[in-house]
Amino acid sequence: MSDSTRNVSADAADGFASRYGREPLGLWSAPGRVNLIGEHTDYNDGFVFPLAIDRRTVVALALRDDGVARVASSFSDDTVEVALADLSPAVLSGWSAYPFGVAWALGQHGADLDALPGFDAYFDSDVPVGAGLSSSAAIESAIGMALNDVWNLDFDRRTLARVGQLAENKAVGAPTGIMDQSASLLGERDAAVFLDCRSLDAEVIPLGFEPAGLELVIIDTNVSHSHATGGYAERRASCEAGAAALHVRSLRDLTVDDLERAEAVLDDVTLRRVRHVVTENARVLDAVRTLREDGPRAIGELLDASHVSMRDDFEISVPELDLAVSTAQRNGALGARMTGGGFGGAAIAVVPSHLVAQLSESVRDAFAAAGYTAPDIFSVQPSEGARAEPSA
Ligand code: ADP
Ligand code: MG
């Protein structure tokens, strides 16, 4: 687990200086994210509700007077170099495909890579990698913000989110939606981003966790199952089959009232997959309305219901996630659910601050008693999206 107390900006500036032998021109950062509610709804044209967290990837960057780009990271000893004019997904591989992919994707959106100056960039980060907190969107959004500034591109944040997604889809080759980049770029303190994955409309919704004395606790089970990729593809296929059988473009076009009709048409498994997506979309809308009308303490039961739906209907939970959720619920959480794609990863819980220590201990004890690998448990604060950082 990364250390959230160190000064990542200062470390990025130092890393830049020692790797490149000069001072950076500036520092930019972007956060990881967690999805509060709305799981497996993105590829069904539905709703998601992620928030930016107080774990950030910082890039220190300076321009060069040639067309060469170099990237380096505290994660890796290598410094990777490419000529901007030669950038294409075909020449990219490894971790540098994320930042170089963004430079390439900016070119696809109109930046003239043949004429722009090259750059040296160095990344440091306290976003845990592969824990479902989207370190990938953090690195994409950080370099996107930096290049947008130093190249005077004037792209807005929504465009930068598309740039990050294009990089991830085409340069990295991961078929992801736009949720992660939207959260990382549009997030605000004590707020979450309500995103319509069809229209790409995004609205920042205040959470009110701070005044209510609530914390968002992440319980990373440290479990990752090899069938996650296959399971994901299978769930996607079921959703497509369900939409086709019910003659809609995507499951987004169904409401809870359509489920009776679905029952008559679909086999049991497909029905349950469809029911998860349809009810989950309704829960996201409910969560947004509940926050506005009743405040944050009232969303707990929606989180609980989301977990049950993923466990029983979508069948993407694992015993470790179920134990994390049920133990949190029994120890003061207002609501808890697994988050992310499933088959492992993390659960989240909304918890009154004064109960966090006791709850964490109870979850650790329950995991030990069950013979499971110890989980990593930490609180995150809903935080501001990508930004320029003051020089260290
Ligand atoms: P996550 O759930 O954390 O987004 P991904 O597999 O999507 O997991 O992305 C993680 C990958 O992103 C890493 O394996 C690495 O290639 C790249 N990455 C993320 N952050 C950094 C960083 N600070 N420095 C170098 N590479 C990074
Ligand atoms: Mg990722």
Image: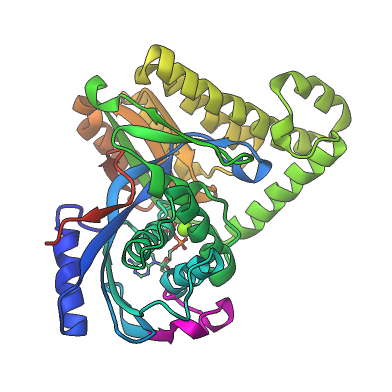
* 131 vs 349: above or below: below
Left or right, 229 with reference to 182: right
Provide residue 269's location: percent of width, then percent of height: 76, 38
In the image, 253 versus 23, the foreground residue is 23
Q: Which is more toward the observer, 12 or 112? A: 112
Give yes or no for residue 94 being in the magenta stretch: yes
Q: Considering only vertical position in the picture, is 333 above or below 346?
A: above
Residue 365 position in % (x across, y down) = 29, 40
Whether residue 195 is visible here, answered yes or no, is no
Question: Residue lying furthest top in this view?
Answer: 294
User: Is 255 situated left or right of 115 in this image?
Assistant: right
How far across and how far down the image is residue 48, in percent? 53, 37
Which part of the image, by quadrant, shows the N terminus?
Answer: bottom left
In this view, which residue lies farthest toward the left? Answer: 392
Q: Which coloring applies here? A: rainbow
The span shown in magenta is: 81-96
Q: Is residue 189 left or right of residue 101?
A: left
Q: Does residue 190 sit above or below 147 in this rendering?
A: above
Q: Tell me the quarter of the picture where residue 272 sits.
A: top right
Query: Relative to 294, is 390 above or below?
Result: below
- Residue at point 54%, 83% (across, down): 91
- Label total for image: 0
User: Is residue 80 in view from this perspective?
Assistant: yes
Foreground: 197 or 259? 197
Residue drawn at the location 32% of the way across and 63% of the way down: 146
Magenta residue check for 84: yes
Residue in the image at 35% along x and 59% along y: 145
Q: Quadrant of the C terminus?
A: bottom left
Tell me where residue 284 appears, x and y as whole percent. Answer: 53, 28
Closest to the observer, 5 or 378: 5
